[in-house]
Each structure stands twice: as structure tokens, then as C-alpha cells.
Image (cartoon, grey):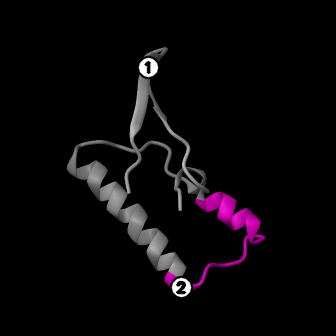
Amino acid sequence: KIIQLVEHFDYHGHCCLVFKLYGHSVFDFQRKYNFRPYHIEDTRHIMYQICYAVKFLHDNKLTHTDLKPENAYL
């Protein structure tokens, strides 16, 4: 799922995007479970969602410049 853009603004020549905060991030989930490894099924599901989102961006000639667990929501 791709979250909806709330607003955007320019900050010293950088385009900043604002999104509504949804659920828990992958990092929140990791922290909650003391950074134990995920089950392989959960890992596949998370990676599929991330790859799907990145493909959507690529297909629309967009780039995610801050892809990390804190920015991936479950």
C-alpha cells in the first residue's frame, strides 16, 4: 500500500513531503520483539511489500531517498 501525500514544501531547495503517520514501522516491530529475527514468511511478506512500493516509484520515475526500517510501515 502506498500512503497518501498530505502536503509538500520547499526547504532550502529541498522538496519535503508530508505524509500521515500510519501504524507501526518495521523498526518499531523489531524493537518490540528485541530485534529477534523474523520468521521467513514474515520476511517474505515485508520484502514483497517494499519491492512492490519501490517498483511503483520506479515506474513513476520517483526516488525514495530515505528507505529504512523506520520508514516502512506494517
Above or below — where is 34 with respect to 11?
A: below
Residues drawn in magenta:
26-41
Q: Residue at x 53, y 85 (%)?
A: 40
Q: What percent of the width, then of the height, locates residue 27? A: 65, 59
Q: What percent of the width, then of the height, locates residue 7? A: 42, 26
Residue placed under numbered mark 2 in the picture:
40
Above or below — where is 70 with respect to 52?
A: above
* Residue 9 marker: 1
Q: Residue at x 45, y 75 (%)?
A: 45
Q: Quadrant of the N terminus?
A: bottom left
Q: What percent of the width, then of the height, locates residue 32? A: 75, 66
Inspect the magenta stretch and tell me whether residue 50 lies in it. Answer: no
Above or below — where is 12 with respect to 57?
A: above
The single residue placed furthest to the top in the displayed view is 12
Q: Quadrant of residue 35?
A: bottom right
Q: Nearer the viewer, residue 67 or 31?
A: 31
The single residue placed furthest to the bottom in the displayed view is 40
Quick one: SS at disc 2? helix
Quick one: SS at disc 1? strand
Q: Residues within 10 Å of mark 2 (few under 14, many from 20)?
A: few
